[in-house]
Each structure stands twice: as C-alpha cells, then as structure tokens.
Image: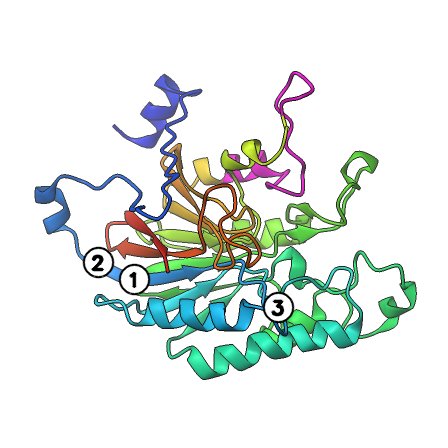
Amino acid sequence: MNRNTFLDRREFLVSVGVAALGAAGACAPKPPPSTQSEKKRALRIAHLTDIHAQPGGRSAEGMARALRHAQNQPDRPDAIFNTGDSIMDSLKADKTWTERQWETFSNVLQAECKLPITHVIGNHDVWGWDSPDTTIQEDPLYGKNMAIQVLGLANCYYSFKRAGWRFIALDSTHLPTQASQRIHPYIGKIDDEQFQWLAKEIEKTPPETPICILSHIPILCACELFDGPNEESGDWVMPAAWMHIDARRFRQLFLQHPNVRLCLSGHAHQHEVLDYLEVRYVNSGAVSGNWWNGAYMDFPPAYVLIDLYEDGTSESTFVPY
C-alpha cells in the first residue's frame, strides 16, 4: 500500500508505539527474522542528549561514563549525535558561569569522545534569554552565539549526508510569539526562514535517499502529556516549550516527502518511540536522567543506539548505563 492510499483510507489513524522501558529497555518493534536478515545496516549511531554538564557534582563523571559505555559497545557505533542541552543551563546564568559550564563539557568531550560527533543546540545552551541583566544582550556571544562558537558550528541549523542517508539538524529553540507562551523564555518551533531552508533541503534530496531530522525539542511526542498535571483543566494541555508548536507544518511537509523516515530529539528526559504516518519519532531520554539526580519520570540516565538501514528503516535500543 503506498502512502497516498494509506492516507486516503486512514487519514486520522495514528500508529503509536511508545517504548517506555526502564532499565530493561529495548524498543522499536523489530521485523521478522527473515526480513531483518535481508536488510543491510548503513550506520549505527549513539544518540546522547540532555547531558547538562556543569562544574562539580556528578555531571562530568557521568558524561564521561556515558561516552565510554557507548563507545565500548561490542557492536560499536559509527558516530555520536548530541541533540542539545549540553550544559546545565545558561538561560539565566551570567557569562562566567556559562563559560565554566561549557569548559566542563568541552574538557570531557575532548578527553573521552573518540568518534565523529554531531551537535544540535538545546534550549539550555542559549545564553541569557531569561537573564534579568539586559546589558548582556550587547555581548556578541549572547543567545546562541556562544554555543555555536564552542561546538564549532557554522550555523544553528545545517545538513549533511552520510552512509546513504541525509541528516538535517534543526534549531528548535525560539522566543515566544504570544503572551500565553511566555511562561517559558522559549518555545519549540522553527521560524519561516529556517522552514523554507528545510523544505528546500528535503526537496533537493533524491526520493530514494532516506532523511533523518535532528532537533532538540520533539517535533511530535506523547510522553510530555504525563509530565505534570496537564489534564487538570479538563482538557489535555501541553506547553509550547515542550513540543514543536508548529508540528502541523512539519506534518504537511513530511506527507509530501515519503523519504522523511526518522526524527530524533531529546528535551523531555523521557524515552518514547512513536510511529505516525510512516515517520518514526524517537525521543531518546537523557544522559543526565533527572538532571544527575537519578531517574526522571521512571527513566534512568541513558542513551539510545540507533541502527539505520539502507532501505530507510531504523531500529533503536534504549541503553541505561
């Protein structure tokens, strides 16, 4: 059944596979053995997200342990994807503390990371958006610029090709646009300029090339509904800071391009695999768990191994370390 037929007959069908596995946790349904044996793996990724490094405490040791654990897997990954919140928080921090947090992250990364690594900027990596000191807005490193400099990025969003897949890294942290959203200093979305760039990147990708989208804030998720009393009003309510408020825009774009197969994100500190209209959304939990205080929402500190196949399919395994 092709995608158009599927949509015509099942327009409102959502196929959700939520993998809420704790320490045991392999996720993502696997094909029958006969099918799996015919597939050829293109790439294995260790997806580490929400490291939240800072001086002192457990974060540096924990980050190093997670990197060593991932890189010492018997079936070693080819690369590491870090989808943001690399440091504990710079939204409210002053410049000195922000620089010290980045120094901790960079030192551990230099000492422990032996694989190619791809970075995405998270909301806590943005300096000063929630600071009462408005004078820092004149600093050239204000906002996302310090993260861009430390992580060695040419831009907040970019794309690259590897092992027959196209990867598109997004900048999903933006300022609120409505008064009702200002409970947080940011929301999950991309602006018009970035969306037009994204659409062009997808359009110029050959239809036989599978696409993986990387974002810090989930484009689509369900687990965030349980993070707090989000139904107490009598309706389910999710803040725009927790999931992309422009998810419907992505939905329409992805429908036009069936080679968009996978979206990887962090932010929620929970693990979930959700299949919707033939796109798989993997929210990979958090290396820091509950910000280095054990498990968060029953999810221990962990990372996820992602296996990408030449046919555009993927499998994932939740790995507490």
Looking at the picture, tell me which residue is in the foreground, 304 or 172: 304
> Where's residue 45, x and y in %?
34, 62
> Where's residue 186, x and y in %?
72, 49
Furthest residue toward left: 34
Tell me if mark 2 has few (under 14), some (14-19) or many (20+) residues whose alpha carbon lies within 10 angstroms of its own: some
User: Residue tagged by mark 2?
Assistant: 41
The answer for how far apart the CA atoms under marks 1 and 3 are is 25 Å
Q: Do the numbered discs 1 and 2 sit on residues whose CB atoms are within 8 Å? A: yes
| Residue 296 shows in this picture | yes
Amino acid under label 1? Arg
N-term-proximal mark, 3 vs 2: 2
On the rendered image, what quadrant is the C terminus found in? Answer: bottom left
User: Residue tagged by mark 3?
Assistant: 155
> Where's residue 298, x and y in %?
46, 42
Q: Which marked residue is nearer to the observer: mark 1 or mark 2?
A: 1
- Residue at the spot x=67%, y=38% of the render? 240
* Left or right placement of residue 36 versus residue 308 in this view: left
Tell me if mark 1 has few (under 14), some (14-19) or many (20+) residues whose alpha carbon lies within 10 angstroms of its own: many
The answer for how far apart the CA atoms under marks 3 and 2 are is 30 Å
Looking at the rendered structure, the secondary structure element under dot 3 is loop
User: Residue tagged by mark 1?
Assistant: 44
In the image, the segment drawn in magenta is: 231-253
* Left or right placement of residue 5 versus residue 237 in this view: left
Looking at the picture, tell me which residue is in the foreground, 198 or 262: 262
Amino acid under label 2? Arg
Amino acid under label 3? Asn
Looking at the rendered structure, the secondary structure element under dot 2 is strand
- Residue at the spot x=62%, y=66% of the render? 87
